[in-house]
Image (spheres, rainbow, N blue to C red):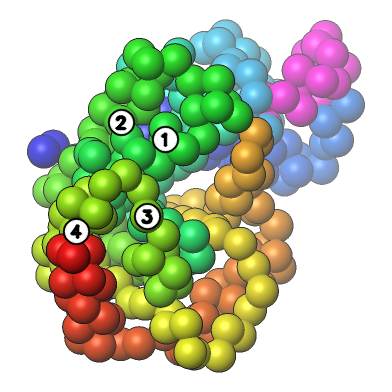
Amino acid sequence: MPSQQGSPTVRRLRLGQELRLLRERRKLTGSKAARELGWSASKVSRIEAAKTMPSAEDVKALAKLYHVDGEKLDELFGFLRDAEQRGWWEDYEDSLPEEYTRFLGLEAEATFQRNWEPQLVPGLLQTDDYAREVILATRGIARITHSGVRSRVEARLDRQQRVLHRTDPCTLTVVLDESALMRRFGEPSVMREQMEHLLEISLLPHVSVQVLALESLHPVNTGAFIHLKFAAFDDVVYLEQLYTADFVDDLERVAGYETAFDHIRSEALDEDESRVLIQRKAMLWRR
């Protein structure tokens, strides 16, 4: 699987971030820059927040205002070219929530991913049958069609290939609660296959799977979250709810989630002990 370089989502954010920094270095407010260009203040704000894609002429105008040329200007246009490309996840836009497709765009360029999951096996580690049962479990609430279920399963499996099996995969560290190994989705055979798959994936050199045993001290009372780290971009935490999802990029709050993950991981079984527990659960699902 080829490496997913130049994620459009990340490049769009990088472009907005660079334009904001260049404006601030010229001691200009967003409103002042907008007046100088004859734009609305909201246009500058939306470009910097990556909510609006600037045109090549927009970038040229901003670069001229900020006295940017040479290599820096080439870098800005490089971000713009990458931001205009399609990401693999865009093939599934019709069946996936907007916030989730944005997450997939960020994940595509993450170098480290830390995932705490207290309820079920994380999507990156799911079998196709388990994924289907998880999606069907929310079908009555989210009103997902048959084709929508199929598309979401395909997107989940495609994501696994793009993230776990690319030539330069990110480092994935997962801590899941023991209850996630006990909560049934589908027939026992689905659960048994899922446990066996979890064991297999845990042996990949770039994947770490640990289980927080039920008798362990639970040091942090928080729901599931995914912490993404990048080589040249600030960390982001992704929080998924029933109908919406949130992104946390405030540095202090991100640091809080990182500390929370470290606390949870410190109370979890180590990788070898976790495999033993997962193996025991697999045997229980044979009955």
Question: Tag 2: residue type?
Answer: Val
Question: Tag 1: residue type?
Answer: Ile
Above or below residue 227? Residue 79 is: above
Query: In the image, which disc is placed on residue 135?
Result: 1
Image quadrant in which the N terminus is located: top left
Q: Residues within 10 Å of mark 3 (few under 14, many from 20)?
A: some
Determine whether label 3 and label 4 are within 8 Å by CB: no
Give the distance between the C-alpha atoms of the residues marked 1 and 4, in whole angstroms: 18 Å
Determine whether label 2 and label 4 are within 8 Å by CB: no
**Magenta stretch?**
33-48
Which of these two is toward me, 32 or 142? Answer: 142
Determine whether label 3 and label 2 are within 8 Å by CB: no
The residue positioned 35% from the left and 14% from the top of the image is: 147
Question: Tag 4: residue type?
Answer: Arg
Query: In the image, which disc is placed on residue 184?
Result: 3
Which of these two is toward me, 43 or 56? Answer: 43
Above or below residue 135? Residue 216 is: below
Give the distance between the C-alpha atoms of the residues marked 1 and 3, in whole angstroms: 13 Å
Q: Which numbered mark, 1 or 3, is in the foreground of this view?
A: 3
Q: Residues within 10 Å of mark 2 (few under 14, many from 20)?
A: many
Above or below residue 100? Residue 216 is: below
Among the two numbered marks 1 and 3 on one chain, the one whose residue lies closer to the N terminus: 1
The residue positioned 37% from the left and 77% from the top of the image is: 211
Among the two numbered marks 1 and 2 on one chain, the one whose residue lies closer to the N terminus: 1
Q: Which residue is mark 4?
A: 192
The residue positioned 82% from the left and 42% from the top of the image is: 27
